[in-house]
Every structure is written in structure tokens, then in C-alpha cells.
Image: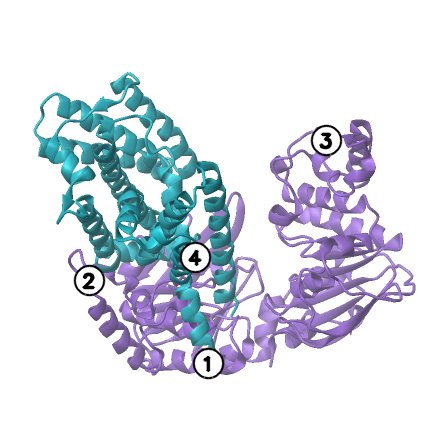
Amino acid sequence: MSITLWNKIKKKILDLRTLIILIFICVLFAVLKDTFYNPINLINILKRSIYIAVAAFSTTLMLTQGNLDISVGGTAALVGTILAIILKANVPLPLAILVGLLSGALAGLIVGIISIKGKTETFLVAIAMKYVYVGIAYLITRGTPIPINNKTFLNVFGTGEVFGFLPMPIFILIAAFLLIWFLYKKTKYGYYLRAIGSNIEAAIVAGINTDRIKIITFVINGTFAAIAGLNLAGIFAFGSPSVASDLALDAIAAVVLGGSAVSGGKGNIWGTVVGVLIMGVINNGLQLLGAQYDIQSIIKGAIIVIAILLDSWVSRTEYAK
Amino acid sequence: MASEIILELKNVSKTFSGVTVLKNIDLDIKKGEVHALLGENGAGKSTLIKIVSGYHSMDEGGELLVHGKKIDIKRPKDSINAHISTIYQELTLCPHLTVAENIALDKQDTFKGMLQQQKEFTRLSRNTLNSIDNPDIDTKLLISDLSIAKRQIVEIAKAVASDAEVILMDEPTASISQKDAEALMHLVLKLKEKGVSIIYISHRIHEIRQIADRVTVLRDGNKIGTLKKDEMTDERIINMMVGRDLKQMYPKKKVVLGETVLSVENLTTKKFRNVSFSVQRGEIFGIAGLVGAGRTEICDALFGRMPILSGTIELFGKPYLPNKPKDCIDKGIAYITENRKESGLCLPLSVNENINLVNLREKMRLGIVNQNRFEELSEKYRNTLDIRIQSINMLVRKLSGGNQQKVVLGKWLEFGPQLILFDEPTKGIDVGTKAEIYRIMGDLVNQGVSIIMVSSELPEILAVTDRILVMREGEMKGILNTHEATSERIMRLAALN
């Protein structure tokens, strides 16, 4: 079967479909509203996308292995409140951050162990654990957000700027991206992860400890949810149990928009970046046009549906050989 | 050639939940030998392979020796470590990984450290592919971009790369073209030259005669015997495979055949070509052939589950174009699929609920289910089909295979089909209930229903049908009158070139 030039072009277009969608909506908003491509606005989009991006990066790994952990919103809220409470008790900042990250890792580990070792549906375990994590967050805050006064923390994770325009958390974003990219592309873990998501029978037959690899992914996902939680706490200057309730869904939507295979095996980390930006641009553009939250939400949903249909169509044409 | 024995099986048996699939099998494989395993569907070949590969464990009392030493194979990894590599029927490649990554997968232990060594993967796969005369496969391509035949080559390369001394191949040529099959057999001989031993399962007798040094025939889980190369004649092999006469087990009533109900002319789909036949009222029309020959696909096409590329069908004298299952049901066709548990029954529901699932609309008043009517019908089929249950409210999941099959039958009979497509009617059903299923089929044709029956069991198809269509590799090889047909004749058409 020879691949003709047209097929090659078609394949490239399909591969780059997310980027094409992003460019299209950017142009659309730029035409509709000239404040859209103002640099300040563009940085604003970026700033508001960071916490979703971080969660979406690790969600890309989860989707590659064929699981989805929707408890991460709870984890992010919990980590924010834990940080606020221990900073209030004058724990040194680095230690507080470390505790925050470890709490996230532990939250992921618990979901992972219950669902993998207990041979249950990850989705259901994650729903249940989200209730637990949010509940703990309410318990330690007694329902009222706890203010955070640590200037360094607020700078690094929240509203600080470098050169007067670049938000500080962007460095966290870059570090998170590089780490995930490295794990996925360069480590043995990433190789096994793709093998498991692609054909778990083959992975088992090859003697890979599939349970361990899967649980590691849950831990990474929990840790990244913690980073997202720290970012949110930094932006709001509060540790609040009620933030981030949509985080998991936003992250999943971005990953799917980015073209990672819903059926597993094929993650697309650059695609996830584009997916996050699409979500950010839609929110921002609609806000500029004066749309309320309700309209934003409807349009966002519609675009995700289109992306899923596109993914299904692409995978059908790809394998219909 | 008195060469060294690499792999030896002694007294290997396997029982799945009470059913014996393999009985006291002894087998030995010499260095550099191609040893073929042959048998009808369900003879136990694949199970035997899966025991050696660590996928299933054997029953107590059996032994497996590698180089004369007894080893314990509990997991697939144990088998790989003993330098035994397996190419399963369902390919075990990862579609989203590259050729190089797949070839390196079984060998990952040798790559130290935490990082992927893509360069090493590429080097290993390049060398392996070169060594088996396939230097043209691009190691950077994803498996999903390769043809089935190329994937098969990659499977073999994966086995070679893991330093396999024995490679088990379960029907490697089942889903590839004749030309690709030739290339693959050439490759097998090449491996043999290198001193690799191969256990080769195939249904195609000509292939086996071409490449095998010895052939062992299994039947119903028993080893019937082993033939050396110079003893392999078609006659002997087929005799060993079939070798039984159970005709008396299947009583066939004489039914007078009526007018033509279905006639199919030059029907062609992606999976079979130019199939023509007709079925008369009251006839049981058999379709024989090996797995993958296109038998089920004929039923799928007649039931609107597979697009028809060309050809014409007439049903009850009128042109008929199967579109979707609903239309076919409305025209009086029922399709009882091979996969009872997947597409035949709702396992968590009761017998009552399952039987009434088709044709629900007629049993409802203003959208509300008429329970009495439901139960009446269920009781009726419980009696006429002799479904052995304590109550019609029993869950279908808990019934035996035979009773489950009767529930499926009841469900379809309820709307009075004129033509029943019956794929493997007695698959997974015990001998006693089998006879009952045949009796029910006999009763149905007596009432003027026609049945198209696909079956892998030759004795069954020879006893129950009026005529038999034999398929091989998507082509029709002939239609036999059952009273003139024999197992040998069918096997010849189905398996020989």
C-alpha cells in the first residue's frame, strides 16, 4: 500500500488539526475585538491557563495509560488549604511547599492503589475520593478560606512578575512541561506507559510490571494537581476548599482537544499545550465580547464535543486500513 | 538427523472449569526443527501453545523440560526467560509504538538505567530485521501504519530479537494473503537454518507439508500421533484429524423441501467473493470451512451487518438488500450469533426478560409492560424448548451453555422467523444438550422454517444438514449434497490448495 502525496498532506493536516483550530479562533477573536491581541491580554490568557495546563500535562500521561482521575480538583483544593494552614503556623516556606506536594502525591497514590490493586473502575474511585479530599479541605479550614500572607509564595506561585510583564508562575509551567515531556519521551517509564496504553496484553506478556507503572502515573498526577493547587492559592492569596472544582474536567477537555487518543496509548503533550490555549482563548475572547459565564460554558462544551467527534473520526480513518 | 531435543512436554493436561481440553500430551521439539501442530477447531492446539508460553498453567502432573531440565512456567515472563517466544493469533504488538520500540519490548531487561535508549532500540531492530531478510521495514514507523503482513514480520523480529530458541506460531498465515504467506514460510525456513526451533500451528495442510519436519495431530484434546516428513500424505493427515464417525448421535428427520426461500447470486463483500447458493423451505443449509474462511461473514452480510459490494439476493422471491438488522428482522430473518454471551443475551437479566426482549411493543399497553403476557410466553418456550430452570425469573447468567442457547432460541422464535441464521449452534454446549438443539432445529424445519447453519464441527454439519457449502479463504469451494459428503471431502475443500 503506497502512501500518496495527498495522503501525506491529509495526515499532516489531521495531525495539526488542533493548532489549526487555535489559529482560527485567535483570528476570529482578533477580528471581532481589537483588544484581543493586545500583549497584556495575551499574557493574561497565559496567566489564567497555568493551573489548568499543569493538571492537563499529567492528565496526558493518565489518558495515555487509559485511566482518568477526576479527583484532582479535590486534591488541588486540599493542597491549597494545607499550605495556608501550615504557613499560618510559621512553617518555613520550602518545607510547606514540600508538604503540599507530598500531600498531592499521597492523594494520587491512594486513588491509584484503590483502583489498580482493588481492580475497580478508576472513574468511580476518583469520584468517591474527590468527596473525601474536598471534605478534608472543609474540615481543616472549618469552611472559611484561610488567607496567605507569605510574600515570597504569593510572588512565585501567584501574581509576581519578572521584567514587569512576565508572570512568575510561568517558570513553574515551563518546568512542569519539561518534566512531563522528559518522562514521556525519554524515560523507560514513558515507554512502558505507551506500551500499556497501546496494548496491555503485550505489556504483560513482555513482563512489565503494569500495576506499578500505572500507580506511578497516579502519583505524578496527584503531584501535578498539587502544583495547580499551589498556583490557585497563590493567585487568590487564600487557601480555600471551594476552588478548582472544575479542574479535572477542564484538564481532560484540554487533553482531548489536544488530540491525545481517548482510547489510550498515544499522548500528545504539545497538543495538550494547544488544547489548554484553545480553552483559555475561548474563555478570554468570549469575556471580551461581553459573554457571561453561561454562554462561555455552552460554547466551551460545544467545542469539546466537536473535538471528540473529530478524534473518533480520525482514529476510524487511521485504522480502517 | 539425531539432533538435540530443546523442548519437551510430558503428560501435559489442561482442564477449564471441569472441561478437559488437553489430555496427557507428550511432545518434543528438536533443535532447528519445524514441528507442526494440526487439528480441527477446538482440538486444543492454541491451549497447548498458551501453556508453553505461560499464558495458562498446566494441570498437576505435567512437566515441561527445556534442554532436558524441568522448568516451571507460571507467567509469560518465565517463558521468555527460557528463550521461548510466542506469536499469538491476536497480535501482541502495540499499535502506537514504533517498530523499534515493539521489537525491543520483550528485551527491555537488557536496557539498563531509567532512560529509553532509542538508539539501542533502533540498532537492535535494524540488525534483527536485516538478519531475517527484511531490511526494508522502517523502524521508525508506527505499527498502526504497517500492513498486517508487515506486522507479522515485526512479531517474528520481536521473537528473534529476544534470543528465542523456540518460537511458537499460532496460525501465522490465517489473516494474510497467499503471497505474504509464502514470504512468511520462507522466513520460517530461514529461522530453521539458524537453528531456531519452531512450533507451527496452521489449518492449511499444504503449508505444513511444505515446511514441517514433523507434524503432530491433536483431536478433542488427545494426541493422535506424530508423522515424519516422509509419512505426511494428505490422506493420513486428514484421517488423523477427522477419524471418527458419530453420525448415529445426530438423528435427522426427513423433511420435504418446499419452494426457494433465499437465493444469493455472486455475493461479494470485503471478506468473501462471488458466493452463490439458494435455500429452500424446510432446508438446513450448512456452511463449513475453517475459522476465517468467511462463513460468519456470509451471515453478517445477509443480516445487514456487513456492507455488500456486489451481487444480488432474493428473499421469498423478492429482491432483498439487507440494510440494517432491524429491517432484516422485519422481513422474517433471525440471526443467532456465535457469541451468545456478547450479542445474544443480557446476562444480568432473567430468562423471562430475555425471552421477551424482541417484539416488546406488542406486549405493551400504552407503554406499560403486560407482565402476564410476558410470563405466559416465557412459560410456553420453557416447555416447548425444554429449558431446565427452577423458575423463569432465574438470571440467565446462572444457566448452563445449553440452556442459555435455548433462551436465545426462544427469544427469536417469539416473532416467528422464516429463516434462521445459526452460527455455531452448539458451541460450548455439552453433548447431551447438543442433541436437543438438533431436535429443536429438526422441529423448526418440519414447521417450514429454513435454517442456515455455520459450523466448525464436521460430524454435526454432516448429520444435520441437507446440503453443505464449503468456504476457503473467502471463496466458495463447492456445495455438496450431505448424503454424498464425507469429512474427508469437506476437509479437502476447506484446507487443501
Asked whether residue B26 appears in the rendered view, the answer is yes
| Subunit ID for the residue under disc 1 | A
The residue that disc 4 covers is A28
In which quadrant will I find the C terminus of chain B? bottom right
Which amino acid does the dot numbered 1 rest on? Answer: Thr
Tell me where residue A120 appears, x and y as whole percent.
41, 36
**Which residue type does callout 2 highlight?**
Thr
| Residue B371: quadrant of the picture | top right
Looking at the rendered structure, which numbered label has been put on residue B392? 3
Q: Nearer the viewer, mark 4 or mark 1?
A: 4
Between B33 and B446, the residue placed more toward the observer is B446
Provide the residue designation for mark 2. Answer: B110
Q: Residue at x 74, y 52 (%)?
A: B326
Chain A: give its colour. Answer: cyan
Say which residue appears at 78% left-offset and 64% top-offset.
Answer: B285
Residue B56 visible, this angle = no
- Name the residue nearer the viewer: A40 or A137: A40
SS for callout 1: loop
